[in-house]
Image (cartoon, helix red, strand yellow):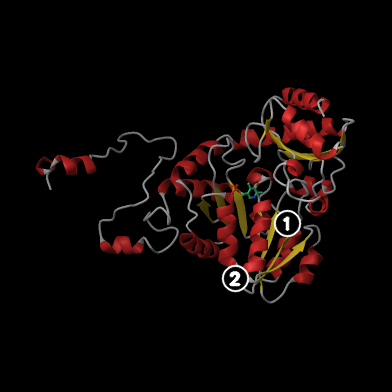
Amino acid sequence: MERTELDDATRSVHPPVSEPEGSTPLGAPLHLDHQFAFATAEALAGAFNGPDAAPLYGRYSNPTVRSLEHALADLERGAAATAYASGMGAINAVITALVGSGDHVITQRALYGGTHALFTDLEKRWGVQVDRVSGDDPEEVWALLRPNTRLLYLETIANPTTRVSDVPALAAVAREAGVPTAVDNTFATPLLFRPLDHGADIALHSTSKYLGGHGDAIGGAAVFADRGLHRRVWEHGVELGACASPFNAWLTLRGLRTLALRVPRHSANAAAIARRLADHPAVRSVAHPDLPDHPDRDRASRLLASGGGVLSFDLRGGRAAGAAFTEALQVASLAPSLGDVKTLAMAPASTSHHRLTAAELEAASITEGTVRIAVGIEDPDDLWADIERALAAV
Ligand SMILES: *Cc1c(COP(=O)(O)O)cnc(C)c1O
């Protein structure tokens, strides 16, 4: 129809849309649309076909989200990726796509809290069999493999202990048994470690952390070495509905541009703070992969480009000291999460884990006086002055 024939009601719903002509935007365009139109019924039908088909509906794909997926697959050296609404969305999509009732999973004892809760729930309500290993010993995985083992699930750097798993050795055992390995690589980022280069099949991320980097875009992603596995998990994800928001994907893409500047700075700042904490009389012990006395020091220096931005330490004064220390910080914030350009600190025993008994805390490798600091990219001397002042208040 000619535009001149149209009524205002139709004109206002269908305004002319302009695309750039004669130049190209330097960043990925932000397409908020969650529905896409097709010229033919056949083209529309084809768009239902898989993760690489034309954008169809936001839960299937979106061009801005796809730009993020391509960026993350590129950084992790994977074949394909899917972005999700959150890290837990990605973790849920992968685990529940690959594991069903009566299946068996091998995972680590030290896991991100949300992932630990998911496995516990799958065990209790879905009859999934879950075995937990230390992350150190491939023999342990060998001994636990069963005909119905469907997944080996690991984390590169554990929270808050900063223990480093032997991903290459454990993934090699799973590979020999035909079992896929998924690795939560959130703490490391692909700049410190690339799980797919070390025999894993899936690298998982909470992009809410270092990849986005600015604490303003919750999101997650799964990167796959193999397109077949990518497709299987994608199909399940369409049912699950934990799809990434285009705006958050766009913010994450913007954050990614400075990843290679931020990550080494996070690591260097955290290592500097960890060394100074280790000499402080109020501190019983410090954990950071770059410290010479870290239990996985050799493995960390072999596998990781640097130790990452998260450290934890034990205050001699227990729970009260942890609370007093985090409340006295002025540059750093008393806040959960990590991977932000700003330094964030919390004492799990008095905050996220306040309902746990001393025995339960110990089982989670957390003491009453444990403090976790997700070190930001501020000036390290300013950060240390803040920490020293807060330690004096303990
Ligand atoms: C934060 C985090 C998650 C969960 O990610 P969300 O984006 O908060 O859902 C999973 N794993 C690790 C290691 C994390 O730090």
Judged from this view, the residue extending furthest toward the left is 5
Find residue 380 and report its horizontal and vertical position in percent. Answer: 73, 26
Relative side of 95 to 14, left or right = right
Above or below residue 129? Residue 280 is: above
* SS state under label 2: loop
Q: Earlier in the sequence, mark 2 or mark 1?
A: 2
Contact (CB < 8 A) between labels 2 and 1?
Answer: no
Gap in angstroms between the C-alphas marked 2 and 1: 24 Å
Mark 2 residue's CB less than 8 Å from ligand 1: no
Left or right placement of residue 151 versus residue 385 in this view: left
For residue 100, which numbered disc appears in the image?
2
Q: Residues within 10 Å of mark 1 (few under 14, many from 20)?
A: many
Q: Examine the image and state in which quarter residue 229 appears.
A: bottom right
Q: Position of residue 27 (x, y in %)?
A: 44, 37
Looking at the rendered structure, which numbered label has been put on residue 167? 1
Return the mark for residue 201.
none
> Tag 2: residue type?
Gly
Tell me residue 278's x, y (percent).
86, 34
Q: Amino acid at mark 1?
A: Val
Q: Mark 2, mark 1: which one is toward the viewer?
A: 2
- Residue 215 vertical position relative to residue 115 in the rendered view, above or below: above
Can see residue 181?
Answer: no
Task: Give the residue at x 41% y 50%.
Answer: 62
